[in-house]
């Protein structure tokens, strides 16, 4: 009976760890997407500033 309880507890901890890992992975993907979007925005701003500098 103690063994069954240990196994059940371990399985529960594994499930919690899997959920945590999934949430962390999803958050990481979200942050990466935001970084890509910001990088593209900065590139566009940089190009615009360079064009304005050439016009002056």
Image (cartoon, helix red, strand yellow):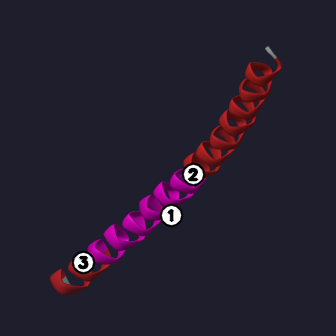
Secondary structure beneath dot 2 equals helix
Which image quadrant for residue 20?
Answer: bottom left
Quarter occupied by the N terminus:
bottom left
Mark 2 surroundings within 10 Å by alpha-carbon count, few (fewer than 14), some (14 through 19), many (20 or more) = few
Secondary structure beneath dot 1 equals helix
Up-down: is 53 above or below 47? above
Name the foreground residue: 8 vs 37: 37
Mark 1 surroundings within 10 Å by alpha-carbon count, few (fewer than 14), some (14 through 19), many (20 or more) = few
Which image quadrant for residue 12?
Answer: bottom left
Residue 43 lies in the magenta stretch: no
Q: If you read the primary sequence from the N terminus, does the residue marked by circle 2 or circle 3 appear first?
A: 3
Magenta-tinted stretch: 9-29
Name the foreground residue: 25 vs 44: 44
Q: Which residue is mark 2?
A: 32
Up-down: is 4 above or below 17? below
Cα distance in 3D space between marks 3 and 1:
26 Å
Question: Which residue lies at the image location 37% right of the left edge and 65% below the top edge?
Answer: 17
Q: Name, please, the residue furthest toward the top.
A: 56
Q: Position of residue 21 (x, y in %)?
A: 43, 63
Residue 14 lies in the magenta stretch: yes
Secondary structure beneath dot 3 equals helix
Mark 3 surroundings within 10 Å by alpha-carbon count, few (fewer than 14), some (14 through 19), many (20 or more) = few
Horizontal arrangement in the rendering, residue 36 relative to residue 22 (left or right): right
Horizontal arrangement in the rendering, residue 46 relative to residue 13 (left or right): right
All told, the count of numbered labels is 3
- Mark 1 against mark 2, which lies toward the viewer? 2
Name the foreground residue: 46 vs 9: 46
Q: Position of residue 39 (x, y in %)?
A: 63, 42
Q: Which residue is mark 3?
A: 5
Circle on res. 22? 1
Up-down: is 48 above or below 14? above
């Amino acid at each position: 009976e103690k063994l069954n309880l240990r196994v059940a507890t371990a399985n529960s901890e594994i499930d919690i760890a899997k959920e945590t890992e999934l949430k962390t992975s999803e958050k990481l993907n979200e942050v990466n997407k935001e970084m890509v979007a910001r990088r593209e925005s900065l590139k566009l701003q940089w190009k615009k500033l360079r064009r304005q500098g050439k016009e002056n």
